[in-house]
Image (spheres, helix red, strand yellow):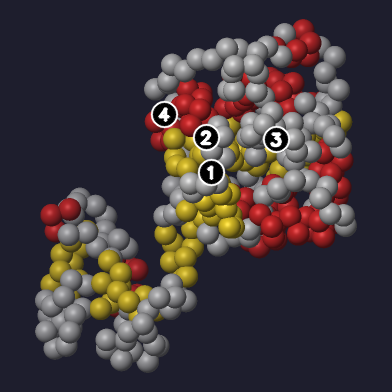
């Protein structure tokens, strides 16, 4: 379902397809290969050219576009016009997000970083382009001490996530390590543990589900219901004394799984992201990597983007795109993940040659590719 949301449209030069006749670069790009690419050029015509030849090729898009704060950064972040704060920015974003949607696979999704300046109009814009039913969540990054005024302190930055087709999108998942067990009710020699649910209640159980079976407690009490693990996995847990049956000798409590500290558990990701670097840390890291302070304002932390990519459970050779490449954090995130798990993810970056930003992107990508021994091709669009 789409939303009927309108604004005053501001045309761009490349709205006219004839303007693309002399804009050529895609003969150098092969998105089916193992290569990563950094394309220097205006992302609007680049996206237009890519969408002509490479529709439905991208597994994930992450972008950190201008927020329309009205501030003067290294890049333009002021789209205000007389009496209209939003229309020029919406026109700019609509063109690019519409093309981005064409590049996404049916099983893909997009993450869009934003602050409160345009958060709510961006949500309406994305509802119109991707459909309200494909909204996943707003993943909020707690990025440090926050931004304050006289009335409040804003601690989070926002990242809206939309699926291309939610019914085809794989469930998100992350690994969590437990650390909060403080008791050991049965004096288990492995130390403190807490119990976690491992079944549905009888009323919620589906007798036709493949995980519907019976288990028997040490006292002989039989429990028949739908479990959250297979019968084989359950038997392994029982043999390892990782099922808590309740107090001895009755052992008549609803069976629950014993979870020890430092246990690795697969969980549904929270939309609050806390355990990543702060804005200041990310800035200090980039300054050190590039060997010069302040070349790029407010870069995102590598582990923030790596976290978002990782929870999506993408194919090992996934193509990740960022058409507001900025300092190139997305490329470094992909390289780091590949090093961690042996993946072969690829990256497609696009950055306009604006106030020297494209050269900053290139410089970082060169350094990162040397560190991780990963190849990236540089292409200048015209």
Could you classify mark 1 by the number of other residues whose Cα lies within 10 Å: few (under 14), some (14-19), or many (20 or more)?
many
Tag 3 near tag 2, CB within 8 Å: no
- Which quadrant holds residue 269? bottom left
- Observer-side mark, 3 or 2, equals 3
Rendered residue at 77%/7% (across/down):
18
How far apart are the two marked residues, 1 and 3, measured between alpha carbons?
18 Å
* Placement of the C terminus among the 4 image quadrants: top right
Does the image show residue 237?
Answer: yes
| Placement of 275 over or under 238, stated as above or below | above
- Which quadrant holds residue 229? bottom left
Is 326 placed left or right of 269 in the picture? Answer: right
Residue that label 1 marks: 158
Rendered residue at 49%/58% (across/down):
174
Is 320 placed left or right of 262 in the picture? Answer: right
Label 4 sits on a secondary structure element that is helix
- Which quadrant holds residue 168? top left
Tell me which numbered mark, 4 or 3, is placed earlier along the sequence.
Answer: 3
User: Along the line of sight, which residue is nearer the eye, 239 or 143?
Assistant: 143
Tell me which numbered mark, 4 or 2, is placed earlier along the sequence.
Answer: 2
Is 205 placed left or right of 90 in the picture? Answer: left
Rendered residue at 79%/10% (across/down):
19
Could you classify mark 3 by the number of other residues whose Cα lies within 10 Å: few (under 14), some (14-19), or many (20 or more)?
few
- Observer-side mark, 4 or 3, equals 3
Could you classify mark 2 by the number of other residues whose Cα lies within 10 Å: few (under 14), some (14-19), or many (20 or more)?
some
Tell me which numbered mark, 1 or 2, is placed earlier along the sequence.
Answer: 2
Residue that label 2 marks: 119
Task: Give residue 132's mark.
Answer: 4
């Amino acid at each position: 379902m789409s939303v009927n949301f309108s604004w005053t449209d501001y045309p761009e030069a490349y709205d006219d397809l004839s303007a693309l006749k002399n804009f050529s670069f895609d003969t150098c790009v092969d998105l089916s290969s193992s290569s990563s690419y950094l394309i220097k050029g205006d992302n609007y015509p680049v996206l237009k050219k890519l969408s002509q030849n490479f529709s439905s090729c991208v597994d994930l898009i992450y972008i950190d576009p201008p927020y329309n704060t009205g501030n003067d950064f290294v890049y333009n972040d002021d789209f205000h016009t007389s009496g209209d704060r939003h229309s020029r920015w919406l026109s700019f974003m609509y063109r690019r997000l519409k093309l981005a949607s064409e590049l996404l696979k049916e099983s893909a999704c997009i993450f869009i970083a934003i602050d409160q300046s345009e958060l709510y109009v961006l949500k309406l814009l994305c509802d119109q382009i991707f459909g309200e039913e494909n909204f996943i969540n707003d993943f909020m990054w707690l990025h440090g001490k926050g931004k304050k005024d006289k009335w409040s302190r804003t601690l989070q930055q926002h990242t809206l996530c939309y699926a291309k087709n939610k019914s085809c999108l794989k469930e998100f998942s992350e690994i969590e390590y437990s650390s909060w067990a403080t008791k050991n009710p049965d004096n288990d020699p492995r130390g403190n543990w807490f119990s976690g649910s491992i079944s549905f209640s009888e009323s919620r159980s589906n007798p036709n589900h493949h995980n519907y079976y019976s288990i028997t407690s040490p006292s002989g009490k039989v429990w028949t219901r739908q479990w959250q693990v297979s019968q084989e996995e359950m038997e392994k847990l029982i043999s390892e004394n990782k099922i808590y049956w309740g107090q001895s000798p009755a052992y008549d409590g609803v069976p629950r799984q014993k979870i020890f500290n430092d246990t690795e558990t697969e969980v549904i990701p929270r939309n609050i992201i806390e355990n990543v670097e702060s804005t200041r840390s990310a800035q200090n890291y980039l300054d050190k990597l590039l060997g010069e302070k302040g070349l790029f304002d407010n870069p995102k932390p590598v582990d923030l983007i790596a976290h978002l990519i990782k929870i999506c459970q993408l194919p090992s050779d996934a193509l990740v795109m960022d058409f507001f490449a900025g300092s190139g954090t997305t490329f470094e995130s992909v390289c780091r993940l590949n090093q961690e798990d042996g993946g072969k993810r690829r990256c497609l970056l696009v950055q306009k040659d604006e106030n020297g930003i494209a050269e900053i992107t290139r410089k970082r990508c060169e350094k990162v590719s040397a560190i991780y021994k990963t190849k990236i091709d540089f292409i200048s669009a015209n």
